[in-house]
Image (tube, rainbow, N blue to C red):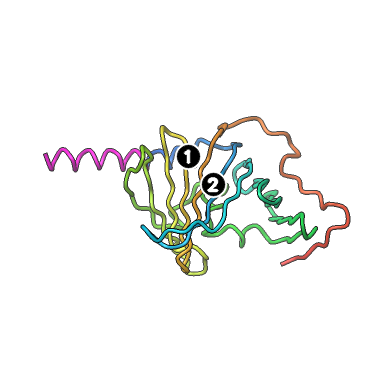
Amino acid sequence: MLALLASGLTAAHAAATDQLQAFVTTVKTARGEFTQRQVKGQGDTLKVTGNSSGSFAFSRPGKFTWRYEKPYEQLLQADGQTLYIYDKDLNQVTERKLDGALGSSPAAILFGSNDLEKNFVVRNGATRDGIEWLELTPKSKDTQFERIGIGFKGGNLAAMELRDAFGNTTLLSFTAMQKNPALPADTFRFTVPKGADVMKQ
């Protein structure tokens, strides 16, 4: 019985690893929707500190839009060279060089090249609610996240869990994902909104 359980776990873990590898090597473009929850604490002391939702699109490597629509509007957009962060309420754009901004961040997993093992230690995780999880630990100490979980279901990216050094966890759920759609050429071209202040970092 124990041997059967062990072999079953190994198969599930291998499947999760395979799904991650397939995602980063075969999904060149994608678009979909996300919901994001911020939580603090663990177990029974879990407290939700924020909810947001929006849409995303990406084209590997390094081109993406990540658009928060509720409860407030914010846009993160990268054209392969530069990351632009636009806060609509402040009418302010922050520009950063993309290489430094991605690094060991969750964005590197979703939108970067497929060289994950360069920046992360990848371990198999548990299966919860039909989602097979992988655990990624950044090799660099210069990152705000100490652990990243990635969940797959039936070959599709279903969820991410991002834990920082302060005990905060960001939970992302992905829906309506289209893999390898044809995206218009200007999808990732950022235009500074009229009157916006631009800060370069």
- Main secondary structure of the magenta stretch: helix
The verdict on residue 10 being magenta is yes
Place residue 120 in its image quadrant: bottom left
Q: Residue furthest right?
A: 195
Q: Which residue is mark 2?
A: 110
| Relative to 144, residue 184 above or below | above
What residue is at 56 percent from the left and 52 percent from the top? Answer: 107
Residue at coordinates 20% horizontally, 39% vertically from top-left?
Answer: 7
Local packing at callout 1 (Cα closer than 10 Å; few below 14, some 14-19, many 20+) is many
Give SS at disc 1. Answer: strand
Of all residues shown, which one is farthest toward the left? 1
- Label 2 vs 1, first from the N-terminus: 2
The type of residue carrying mark 2 is: Leu
Callout in the foreground (2, 1): 1
Label 2 residue SS: helix
Q: Is residue 4 left or right of residue 72?
A: left
According to the image, label 1 marks what residue?
Answer: 157
Left or right of 4, for residue 76: right
**Mark 2 vs 1: CB contact within 8 A:** yes
The residue stretch that appears in magenta: 1-16
